[in-house]
């Protein structure tokens, strides 16, 4: 009897077997339920991400123009953005022209090439041919090879029109600093610009389509007296 009782204790009875299988089945059901819930959560999150991504395409960041001379910032209206031919803000046109001329006439042996490449990217081919003639006349290559330095002092910018095309007149001084001293020449330039699509290399969305400059007799005569 004792051995039989011990065997009975070692082997589970029918009630124990049902209890074990019941626990296993309940655990399986819980696992399946948790899997289904997790799958629903993943689907809901994916759906939410898709909706937010679609909404993000419709949201436009507010463009801000910052005048680098004064530090004053102002929002730019969306109707002035993107499409070629759209009217550009006067302050943005002046900032583009200022940057363009500074890149064109500010140089040293380290910055000359990069500055001119930036100007070239925002000029039409015909315009760049005319500008190269001016640089050759100014002996730019020779000045750079001799490690001289070039600066520009902008005196006045007057926007003559913003549409149908942008026209601006600029008076400025070309300054060349050499080992022998400093030389200056007063110039007046007329620039015509077209609005183009904005992109990383041309955030203003402007292209120089015509550039003419000549000696500014008014400033030259004024400085002589």
Image (cartoon, rainbow, N blue to C red):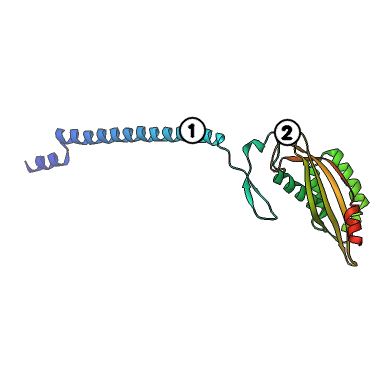
Residue 51 - label: 1
Between marks 2 and 1 in the image, the one whose residue lies nearer the viewer: 2
Q: Position of residue 202 (x, y in %)?
A: 72, 43
Q: Quadrant of residue 125?
A: top right
Residue at left 46%, top 32%? 47
Q: Position of residue 156 (x, y in %)?
A: 79, 52
CB-based contact (under 8 Å), mark 2 and mark 1: no
Residue density around tag 1, few if under 14, some if 14–19, many if 20 or more, within 10 Å: few
Residue density around tag 2, few if under 14, some if 14–19, many if 20 or more, within 10 Å: some
Which residue reaches farthest bottom? 180
In terms of depth relative to the viewer, which is nearer, 2 or 161?
161
The kind of secondary structure element at disc 1 is helix
The answer to whether residue 6 is left or right of residue 215 is left
Q: Which residue is mark 2?
A: 85
Residue at left 89%, top 58%? 222
Q: Position of residue 114 (x, y in %)?
A: 79, 51
Res 81 visible: no
Residue 16 - label: none
The kind of secondary structure element at disc 2 is loop
Residue at left 71%, top 36%? 87
In terms of depth relative to the viewer, which is nearer, 19 or 81?
81
């Amino acid at each position: 009897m004792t051995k039989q009782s011990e065997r009975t204790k070692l082997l589970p009875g029918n009630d124990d077997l049902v209890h074990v299988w019941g626990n296993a089945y309940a655990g399986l059901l819980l696992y399946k339920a948790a899997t289904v819930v997790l799958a629903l959560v993943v689907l809901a999150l994916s759906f939410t991400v898709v909706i937010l991504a679609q909404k993000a395409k419709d949201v436009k960041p507010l463009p801000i123009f910052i005048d680098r001379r004064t530090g004053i910032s102002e929002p730019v209206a969306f109707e002035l953005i993107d499409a070629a031919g759209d009217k550009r803000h006067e302050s943005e046109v002046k900032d583009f022209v200022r940057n363009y001329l500074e890149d064109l006439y500010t140089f040293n042996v380290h910055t000359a090439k990069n500055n001119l490449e930036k100007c070239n990217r925002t000029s039409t081919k015909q315009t760049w041919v005319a500008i190269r003639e001016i640089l050759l006349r100014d002996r730019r290559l020779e000045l750079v090879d001799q490690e001289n330095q070039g600066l520009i002092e902008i005196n006045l910018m007057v926007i003559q029109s913003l549409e149908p095309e942008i026209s601006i007149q600029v008076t400025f001084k070309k300054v060349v600093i050499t080992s022998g001293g400093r030389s200056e020449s007063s110039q007046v330039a007329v620039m015509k610009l077209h609005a183009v699509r904005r992109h990383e290399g041309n955030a203003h969305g402007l292209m120089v389509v015509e550039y003419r400059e000549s000696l500014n007799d008014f400033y030259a005569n004024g400085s002589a007296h």
